[in-house]
Amino acid sequence: MYPPKTFDIGWPDLAYGLAACARDGDAEGAAAAVERRFGAGGTLGTARSADDGGVRHCVAALSVRSALDLALSAAALPRGSEVLMSAVTLPDMWRIVTEHGLVPVPVDLDPGTLLPAAGQWEAAATARTKAVVVAHLFGTQAPLGALAELAARHGWLLVEDCAQAYSGPDFRGCAAADVSLFSFGPLKTATALGGAVAVVRDPGLLDSMRALHRAWPVQGRDAQAGRIAKYALLAVLTSRPLYTGLVAAAGLLGRDHASGLHSAVGAFAGADLLPAIRQRPGPALLALLDRRLGGAGTVRAVAARTAVARRLAARLPDPALVYGAAAPVHTFWLCAVPTPDPDATAARLRSAGFDAARPASLGAVPAPPDRPQGARTAAHLVRHAVCLPLRPGMPDRALDRMAAVLDPEDWGRRP
């Protein structure tokens, strides 16, 4: 049985991370090292520049949620202001917006690019609009030129969520965004089992974010040690032989193995959100993150992941219906397809040895009561998408078998 997702981290990195938990460290110095390393990368659509990506432009945070909370706190937008959001994202992201007394307003997606069209942003805006939060989903990357021009013209804060889009040192988001957020949580590319980096291009906003961040407590080393131990165990359990046995055992016991796995990997599952995210990362987490950012294998791993997804897409009844197929860049952090009955599709795939998953961590941003508007594609994606389990080096016979399970009648039924 192929598990729905594998952890992008090896045993040497896990051992290094555990050893780092046993050492004393300086959180501020470790954060500076991460910021320096991350800031040395390039920016989408521009040449590399030490000034554009320098250390002073980055903040190393506990999570993308923490970084968004910092950015909104530092921006100090008037209460009641509206924040336009691409209509599919983590529920915690719009929850953080509401915790700041702001009103999230969903803007529907184009299923081909997984971003709203430029005209949709302007159509959704009002005089109360003060910010935009746009998420690149499933490994897609796209320049935000038209949206950035619109935001600059109206004076909106533009926050870019690249949590699912990181692909190595040459991608640092759109140079015109005020803030670009990158996640290194458990399921992300080059994971450090936690941690995030915010690229902040407004010097005043950056200074305010740093000042607020320094007032937060540092997460204890026990939290990172516990996470490493948990994900080391999960890495063992999600190896194909053991995972096959676990799925079979769960079926015999009448248990839902998918919900158990989802609960296990939830970064802040069951936590009181704001106290949980308002912490600085500890030196052990930062040491592991610095090591992962410095590794040479990320670009190769992303290329291998993309290649196997494209090999599968070529076998599907209509490759263009893969979510994000029309994006300028798609690195296939997830390869998701629409089906009219995702539970039936997942069951067929599971019987063929592929444990497909639903994008359970994502949700459709609810429209405010006084702004009813349709986000049909977002709602359809959340209800009907199935994420296909892929891993680099998958043999052709496995891809043929997976493609054959997908009924051609499943295709072409988007809203």
Image (cartoon, rainbow, N blue to C red):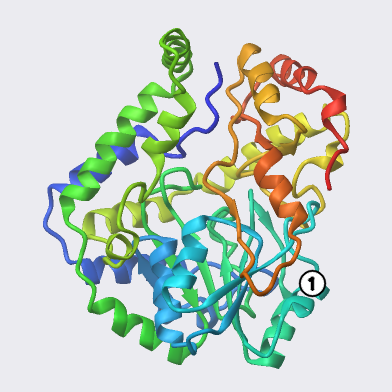
Which quarter of the rendered picture does the N terminus lie within?
A: top right
Percent of width and height locating residue 207: 37, 88
Q: Quadrant of residue 49?
A: bottom right
Q: Residue at x 64, y 80 (%)?
A: 176
Percent of width and height locating residue 372: 71, 68
Is residue 9 depicted above or below 198 in this figure?
Answer: above
Q: Quadrant of residue 322?
A: top right
Left or right, 365 with reference to 316: left
Three-letter amino acid code at the position of disc 1: Gln
Percent of width and height locating residue 266: 40, 44
Q: Residue at x 70, y 24 (%)?
A: 345
Q: Residue furthest front?
A: 370
Tell which of 76 and 238 is nearer to you: 76
Which element is circle 1 on?
Answer: helix
Q: Residue at x 33, y 35 (%)?
A: 231
Q: Residue at x 84, y 48 (%)?
A: 415
Is residue 64 depicted above or below 204 in this figure?
Answer: above
Tell which of 278 and 60 is nearer to you: 278
Judging by the rendered image, the residue that carries numbered circle 1 is 120
Q: Residue 36, can we see it?
A: no
